[in-house]
Amino acid sequence: MSDKTILSVSDLNLYYGKKHALFDITMDFQEKEITALIGPSGSGKSTLLRSINRMQDLVPGVTITGSIMYKGKNIYSPNTDTIDLRKEIGMVFQQPNPFPFSIYENVVYGLRLKGVKDKATLDEAVEKSLKDAAIWEETKDILHKSALGLSGGQQQRVCIARALAVNPDIILLDEPTSALDPISSGKIEATLLELKDKYTIIIVTHNMAQASRMSDRTAFFMDGKLIEYNKTKSIFLTPKEKETEDYITGKFG
Ligand SMILES: Nc1ncnc2c1ncn2[C@@H]1O[C@H](COP(=O)(O)OP(=O)(O)OP(=O)(O)O)[C@@H](O)[C@H]1O
């Protein structure tokens, strides 16, 4: 574990009923870096990502063993308040999923849940979060219009702003650009690169070019196993495992 380790996954196994989906995953995530999780469909990337903020607990029949240490505590300890955990470890999904409210109400959603009522505080959070998500200029004059009226790319940046508004430490993103056109994807990538100064980012992506452009470290998964994990340059230029090389050169997957 290095000084910069923010999350430490040890011997994590996950079963959906009898199906063993993650096998002995052990890996550390570094603070204020972007880590990409790559691998073929069904390799367990989303399962691992969702395990990090205990979203996977919501699936009936799931069994999880092992630990994920965050700020000195095992997030799988029975004492963990998962609502609080998900404020510190936010999530953005593949399909933009704004709520059917105004842009403003989408962004302040988590703050309202926390009981924040002061208008000036909420206004400030809206402006800051939309700026950080690089969507302020496009939305500042229409804050009280429905978020559903925005384009898919704009909706996704509002969803990023919604995640940022509660001031998380870590942002998990599950293929956040796969439903978007290349221009919108490029904007999200640029936004995430800016956010890395303030947040730790873990992103599942099928897009190899995106992983190699954006991430500091890359983890390659296959059949629920972590095959190789290293600095992104090493994974893409000098992979150690044959499976990694075959995948990144497009031989399978
Ligand atoms: N709710 C579920 N119930 C049962 N099995 C599941 C469930 N979710 C995922 N799985 C299985 O667990 C394995 C890992 O799935 P997961 O979605 O984590 O893979 P992935 O690498 O993210 O795939 P993709 O790239 O297609 O999103 C797959 O075999 C999948 O079928």
Image: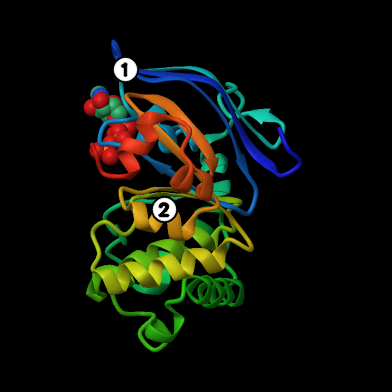
Q: Which secondary structure lies at badge 1?
A: loop
Q: Which residue is mark 1?
A: 61
Give the residue at x 60% y 77%. Answer: 120
What percent of the width, then of the height, locates residue 195? 55, 64
Image check: 129 left or right of 223? right
Colour scheme of the rendered structure: rainbow
Looking at the rendering, in which quadrant would you find the C terminus?
A: top left
Please name the residue that numbered disc 2 is placed on: 211
Instruction: Report helix, strand or loop for mark 2.
Output: helix
Residue 66 screen position, x and y as percent: 54, 17
**Front-most of 74 and 186?**
186
Return the x and y of residue 216 as percentages of the image width and height.
55, 52
- Which mark's residue is nearer the viewer, 2 or 1? 2
As drawn, the residue found furthest toward the right would be 3
Q: Quadrant of residue 251 in the image?
A: top left
Question: Is the CB of mark 1 within 8 Å of ligand 1?
Answer: yes
